[in-house]
Image (cartoon, rainbow, N blue to C red):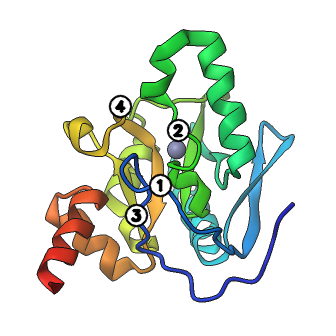
Amino acid sequence: MYVKKSEKMNYLILVNKENPLKDKLKIDLINVGKKNISEDVYMERTAGLSLIKMLDDVNKLFDNEKVIVNSGYRSLKKQKEILEYYLEKEGNIAYKRVAMPGTSEHHTGLGIDVSIFINGKYEEDPTGNEESLKWLFENSYKYGFILRYPKNKEDIHGYRYEPWHFRYVGSSKLAKEIKDSGLTLDEYILKKVKTLK
Ligand SMILES: [Zn+2]
């Protein structure tokens, strides 16, 4: 596992289809749990510690639901494997569902996909109608997270609605500002850049 001490991490880094990750990021990764009790899941240290707190809190609230980690940091190699897996399984539609290697936000260690156990049943891709997820939509900003791929913004962020993917942005203040703006992270950052010019 590639783990290095982070230099100053840019928590507002934008990685999307138009902005692939050019530099080799040095990310200080920590283990945030296991997928299906077997596969370790990693995140950038600060993001990961916030995530652990957030999941601890939400999992105290709903007796029949438990939010668990599904996928965090993905190396370039892992991104290639995932794309190949879905291309094999679904054909070209996979390009809509899976990021091209190098353009995945998971590469930053700041994105996390969650899954849910509902009444003991495992839901890998939750719908967003779950009580625990609804709580996270409203409260994740307190932990520095935003919902990264919201509904009705598919043409802007370029993915399907992903009620399971949260992104750490560095502080609760910033996360609240982004949430309240109603903008996707892509729009928010572009606006910021324009304002600074
Ligand atoms: Zn994701």
Residues at marks 2 and 1 touching, judged by CB atoms closer than 8 Å:
yes
Can you identify the residue that label 2 sits on?
A: 100
Q: Amino acid at mark 1?
A: Pro
Callout 4 secondary element:
loop
Q: Quadrant of residue 149?
A: top left
Identified by mark 4, the residue type is: Arg
Disc 4 marks which residue? 160
Near mark 1 (Cα within 10 A), the count class, few <14, some 14-19 or many ≥20, is some
Write down the residue under mark 1: 20
Discs 4, 2 touching: Cβ within 8 Å: no
Q: Residue 113, position in %: x, y?
A: 56, 46
**Of the residues under marks 2 and 1, which one precedes in the sequence?**
1
Query: Could you tell which of marks 4 and 2 lies nearer the N-terminus?
Result: 2
Q: CA distance from mark 2 to mark 1?
A: 9 Å
Is 174 situated left or right of 44 in this image?
left
Mark 2: amino acid: Met
Task: Tell me the amino acid under the disc marked 3.
Answer: Leu
Q: Are marks 3 and 4 in contact (CB under 8 Å)?
A: no
Report if the beta carbon of the residue with label 1 is closer than 8 angstroms to ligand 1: no
Residue 194 location, x and y as percent? 14, 75
Answer with the quarter of the image where residue 87 lies. Answer: top right
- Name the quarter where the C terminus is drawn: bottom left
Q: Quadrant of residue 42?
A: bottom right
The count of marks equals: 4
